[in-house]
Image (tube, rainbow, N blue to C red):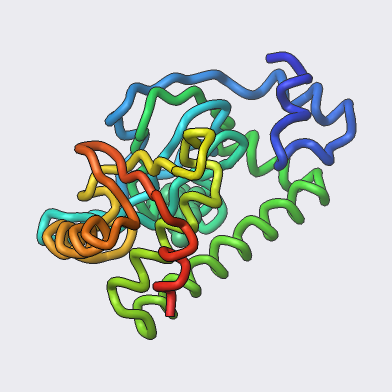
Amino acid sequence: MPVLIIKQIPLFAPLSPPDQEMLASLLRRRSIRKGDFLFHRGDEGTALYIICRGLIKIVVPTKRGDEVTLALLADGDFFGEMALLDELPRSADAVAMEETQLYVLNRSDFLSFLIHNEHAIRAIMQALSLRLRRTDDMVAEVCFLNVSARLAKRLVDLVESRYQRDKGDEKHDVSLTQRELASLIGVSRETINKELKILRQKGIVTTSRNSITICDLERLKNRIK
Ligand code: CMP
């Protein structure tokens, strides 16, 4: 793989050129289609994955048959490090939300790469801390915000993140189904349906089958209390 690509991945960017060369020879490419699972919670961890282009959803399935989304990961993000570090099974499912190209680093290469690179250890620890902070925020939201405020906050976060496609005007598209949105907030699809109806009636959003268009971001932000 070209070293040029390695330099664009935040986890690998701070490495020395010889280390980047070495990594380039260890990474394999893999593509998965929309809807395909890369692994399931409980599987043995055999590799670390880095997203070259695409979107991966990290989800925990519940016994009732629905799921909670822990994170949406996009270009340059990595995942699958936990099972490699703690030697326990995969903590969640990883599923492609669109056609996704990945780089794969197998377990022993990842561990020896970490041992020899202080920069990489720091980058992994920063990423783990950031994930824990986000998860802490999610727990606090569930405890202290009602569903309307949580929905508004999540939609604003998505608009301000890398995962949505801008329409180039005042409107912002969030390409998620109601079921996916429900899983991100940890409520039922019926609850999201009711909340979106209220937002539609107020002229804050419009909805279609696979996306939500935010027409009035300021009024949506005002609902986060
Ligand atoms: P692992 O447990 O090997 O497999 C599932 C992966 O999902 C996990 O490693 C992390 O890379 C990622 N993951 C798990 N929980 C979270 C979270 N709360 N936020 C972001 N990513 C997560």
- For the question of whether residue 42 can be seen, the reply is no
Q: How many marks?
A: 0
Give the residue furthest to the top.
2
Place of residue 83 in the rendered image (x, y in percent of width and height, measured from the top left): 47, 51
Which one is in front, 117 or 51?
51
Q: Is residue 64 left or right of residue 173?
A: left
- For residue 27, above or below residue 215: above
Q: Is residue 215 left or right of residue 203?
A: right
Give the residue furthest to the bottom.
144
- For residue 140, above or below residue 59: below
Q: Say which quadrant the C terminus sits in.
A: bottom left
Place of residue 148 in the rendered image (x, y in percent of width and height, measured from the top left): 30, 71
- For residue 99, above or below residue 178: above
* Residue 97 image-quadrant placement: top left
Residue drawn at x 63%, y 65% as measured from the top left: 129
Which one is in front, 66 or 146?
146
Which one is in front, 166 or 104?
166
Residue drawn at x 46%, y 57% as measured from the top left: 217
Place of residue 190 in the rendered image (x, y in percent of width and height, measured from the top left): 11, 60
Q: Say which quadrant the N terminus sits in.
A: top right
Residue drawn at x 50%, y 44% as measured from the top left: 170
Q: Is residue 109 left or right of residue 208?
A: right
Residue drawn at x 27%, y 61% as measured from the top left: 199
- For the question of whether residue 44 can be seen, the reply is yes
Place of residue 202 in the rendered image (x, y in percent of width and height, measured from the top left): 27, 62
* Residue 174 image-quadrant placement: top left
